[in-house]
Image (cartoon, grey):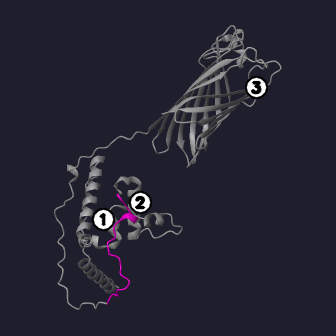
Amino acid sequence: MIRKLLFLFVSFAVFSATFAEKFPQRPLRRTNNPPTDSTTLIGRVYQARLADLVRQCRRDSTALEHVLENPYLFPLFGAPALYNFPIHREFALTAEDSTTVSSWVSQTLLHTYAHDPELILHNLTLLPTALPPRKEHAKEQPTKPSTALLPPIAPPVPSTTFQAPNANDLEITVHKPNFWTFVGNFSFQFMQYYVSDNWYKGGEKHNSFLAATNLEANYDNKEGLVFNNKLEMRLGFQSSNSDTRHRYKTNTDLLRLTNKLGRQATKNWYYTVMLQSWTQFSPGYKSNDPKVYSDIFSPLEAVLSVGMDYKLNRRAFDLTTTLSPLAVNAKYVDRLALSSRYGLDAGHHTKFNFGSSITVNVKWQLMKDVQWVSRLFAFTNYSRVQAEWENTFNFKVNRYLSAKLFLYPRFDDGVRRVKDQSYFQFNEFLSLGLDYTF
């Protein structure tokens, strides 16, 4: 037994010595901690890439010396001209291999045609021919290949003049990105209606105008966080000769602010918190009636909602739908005399309702000069419903002139109903005037 153990021990020792001699262990490479400075990291990566480029140029120096001898590269180094083959290749029904030299040349030419067209000085049909016209009567005699040996060509000497810069010597400037976008629109519309005093059907002449401004400030950090802000202001006045108490009355009056914060969940869905607030600018009257029916902060409504936001963007169609199963509607009336008119208890300024809401915004370019902008809003506390649907059709005449058709149906059974009238309301106007987007 002892002899067997001794034999195994000696055999293992001999095997270990032989393995260590043939496969020596490499010493561990000690690495320093990576630098925490992002600028130094960028510089070192840039330096490494330049070093790889130098090595590749030295390795392929033979091919680089004869690059002009490749016939496929002639369009890149010849006279700058508009060639047909890149366009035919791009619009071909069958896809070709994109890794070939001809494909690379075609993509390079197409990029030049699209981004630097001023560099193209010739047309393919206007280029001078490189060869004289061929004579049909003269027959070319076949030439025998020469058997003489060509002198040997010395290999090119790799260039050593270019060296990759040191990362510590690089001056790197990092520009802070701007994630904000700003959009604005201003319009000033007019409408005039005139009839003579002896018009056989009667009628009343009047003038009206409407000023509207929309401002948007949107934030998107390209990592799923969005913050959208929109301010809408509309104010319109109308004159009426039959109204002896008011020279002008408001026919359109809106001040609305929408703030929405979202975090992307999937490709088209966002977790969203939205706040919508709206009121008006000036008092609202009826013809020959001194009573005030509405005023600034009478009412003031604010809807805070939590839910999901769905966004769909197409070439001429943008859709945003906000589904909020949790929402609170806060209503404030500054004039106590108007409290009961807007669904509040008499003598109270505020009222809160909890429920659900939905908001749908659509922007659709129906045709070149016709655009439809729509907003659908609905809130319910499961005992009453407030819904409104704003539709604006923009008919563009030129850059600064347009016509607008506004259709605004509304339903609200939470306010006091006028006698012999329903809860359904409707507002419409057609106007023509200035329109400018910036």
Q: Report the magenta stretch's main SS.
A: loop
In magenta, the rendered stretch is 121-141
Look at 25% across and 55% down and name the residue there.
32
Residue 16 place in picture, x, y as percent: 28, 78
Give the numbered dot on residue 77: 1
Look at 31% across and 43% down and name the residue there.
174
Give the numbered dot on residue 44: none
Residue 116 colored in magenta in the image? no
Q: What is the quadrant of the N terminus in the image?
A: bottom left
Residue 210 place in picture, x, y as percent: 60, 23
What element does badge 3 sit on?
Answer: loop
Front in this rendered view, residue 308 or 288: 288
Residue 45 place in picture, x, y as percent: 29, 55
Q: In this image, 250 relative to 92: left or right?
A: right
The three-letter code of the residue at mark 1 reads: Phe
Query: Whole-Å distance between the Cαs marked 3 and 2?
Result: 62 Å
Give the numbered dot on residue 110: 2
Residue carrying label 3: 413
Query: Whole-Å distance between the Cαs marked 1 and 2?
Result: 15 Å
Residue 328 placement: quadrant: top right
Q: Is residue 41 above or below residue 237?
A: below
The three-letter code of the residue at mark 2 reads: Leu
Q: Earlier in the sequence, mark 3 or mark 2?
A: 2
What element does badge 2 sit on?
Answer: helix
Graded by Cα atoms within 10 Å as few (under 14), some (14 to 19) or many (20 or more), the crowding at tag 3 reads: some
